Image: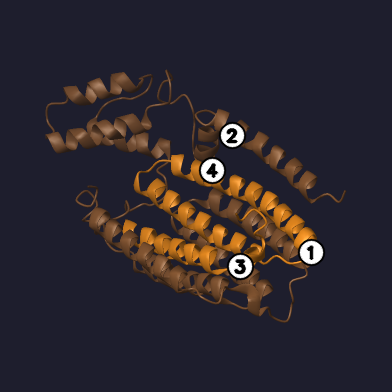
């Protein structure tokens, strides 16, 4: 696993403390979402969980997803929830019927699921470390790193050329060769392009490049789905 | 940072969401619990995106967010209709199709 490759990365205390505080707030918020007796309060606790998730995304250097999370979830979905609460006239002062009276089955299911998931995760990933620089490596940086490591000039090459060049290197061991082959595949442009074709210089650019090339068809399908869902919602909720 | 600390946080959120879906009987509260589950999935996707140095996880997280928005829109419309026909959003009372 990748644990060995990252074992020498020093621990970043500030990141871990930040993670701990945000995670604690998220867990408390999530428990309040499912236990509070007031559905408006539940929506407001949900804001805390969603904001915490956005903060975790920033910690993992996925700033575009974090911003989308704030805009779409906190900005739109929570407001939609509050409208739903308002239109169904749930009592603002507290509603005792929010939860089933016998919830032993739910507790058992939740605890069992958590136990099973935790066991599997710890068993599978153990102490695997995230790469020292957790942001998605910019392709430009990755290219210069690769060139410095291997001495291969990458300009004008495609994926197959790069992999062949790495395979031909004689002064590295197998482990290093495997690492450099995956690095070569990572920096190689998608399709038949050549290294240096696209200047990707930020995480947002990398995401948009991916959406509008590799994932263009799913992206279009999602937009059609959103339109269909909104029209469907209007048709369902419309008064006769 | 460990990969597992993010995965375990997501597992906790997921389990809490599952508890909420089963234990809640208010339609809007059940939809909120589903949002918790979807968020747990998003945290997993972003964590693996950072682990594997790939943007694919982030792209999938964006798709999940878009689909969650569609799901909440349709879900709340259905809850609204249930309220109009049953004068309550207690899901235990929506049993007209029970045999």
Position of residue A8 measured from the top left corner of the image (x, y, whole percent): 21, 56
Which residue is at a point 35% across and 44% down the rendered structure image?
B52
Both labels 2 and 3 in a single chain? no
Numbered label attached to residue B25: 3
Q: Specify whether A104 is left or right of A83.
A: left
For disc 4, the marked residue is A204
Q: Quadrant of residue A69?
A: bottom right
Please say if A178 is above or below A97: above
Residue A131: numbered disc:
none
Q: CA distance from mark 3 to mark 4?
A: 40 Å
Label 1: chain? A
Mark 4 falls within which chain? A
Rendering coords of residue A28 (x, y %):
49, 75
Mark 4, other Cα within 10 Å: few <14 / some 14–19 / many ≥20: some
Disc 2 to disc 3, how far (Cα)?
34 Å
CA–CA distance between discs 2 and 4? 16 Å
Residue A219: give its label: 2
Helix, strand or loop at label 2? It is helix
Mark number displayed over residue A87: 1
Query: Percent x, y for residue B2?
Result: 31, 59
Of circles 2 and 1, the one toward us is 1
Q: Which callout, 4 or 1, points to the residue nearer the camera? A: 1
Is the residue at mark 3 from the same chain as the one at mark 4? no
Q: Is residue A236 visible?
A: yes
Alpha carbon separation for disc pair 1 and 3: 17 Å
Question: Looking at the image, is mark 2 or mark 4 nearer the viewer?
Answer: 2
In this picture the colour scheme is by chain
The colour of chain A is brown
What chain does badge 3 belong to?
B
């Amino acid at each position: 696993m990748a644990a060995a490759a990252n074992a020498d990365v020093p621990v970043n205390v500030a990141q871990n403390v930040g993670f701990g505080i945000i995670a604690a707030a998220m867990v408390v918020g999530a428990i309040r979402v499912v236990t509070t007796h007031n559905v408006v309060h539940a929506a407001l606790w949900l804001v805390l969980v969603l904001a915490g998730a956005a903060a975790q995304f920033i910690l993992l250097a996925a700033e575009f997803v974090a911003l989308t999370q704030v805009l779409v979830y906190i900005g739109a979905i929570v407001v939609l929830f509050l409208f739903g609460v308002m239109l169904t006239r749930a009592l603002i002062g507290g509603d005792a019927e929010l939860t089933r009276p016998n919830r032993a089955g739910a507790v058992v299911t939740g605890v069992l699921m958590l136990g099973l998931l935790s066991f599997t995760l710890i068993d599978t990933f153990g102490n695997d470390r995230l790469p020292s620089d957790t942001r998605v490596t910019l392709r430009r940086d990755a290219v210069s790193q690769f060139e410095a490591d291997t001495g291969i000039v990458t300009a004008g090459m495609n994926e197959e050329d790069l992999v062949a060049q790495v395979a031909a290197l004689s002064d590295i061991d197998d482990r290093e060769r495997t690492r450099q082959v995956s690095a070569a595949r990572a920096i190689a442009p998608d399709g038949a392009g050549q290294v240096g074709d696209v200047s990707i210089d930020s995480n947002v650019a990398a995401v948009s490049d991916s959406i509008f090339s590799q994932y263009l068809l799913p992206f279009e399908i999602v937009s059609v789905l959103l339109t269909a869902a909104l029209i469907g919602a209007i048709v369902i909720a419309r008064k006769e | 940072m460990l990969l597992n600390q993010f995965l375990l946080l997501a597992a906790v959120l997921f389990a809490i969401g599952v508890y909420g879906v089963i234990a809640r009987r208010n339609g809007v509260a059940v939809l909120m619990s589903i949002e918790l589950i979807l968020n747990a999935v998003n945290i997993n996707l972003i964590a693996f995106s950072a682990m594997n140095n790939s943007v694919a996880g982030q792209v999938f997280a964006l798709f999940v967010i878009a689909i969650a928005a569609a799901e909440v829109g349709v879900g709340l419309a259905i809850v609204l209709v249930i309220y109009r026909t049953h004068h309550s959003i207690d899901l235990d009372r929506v049993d007209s199709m029970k045999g």
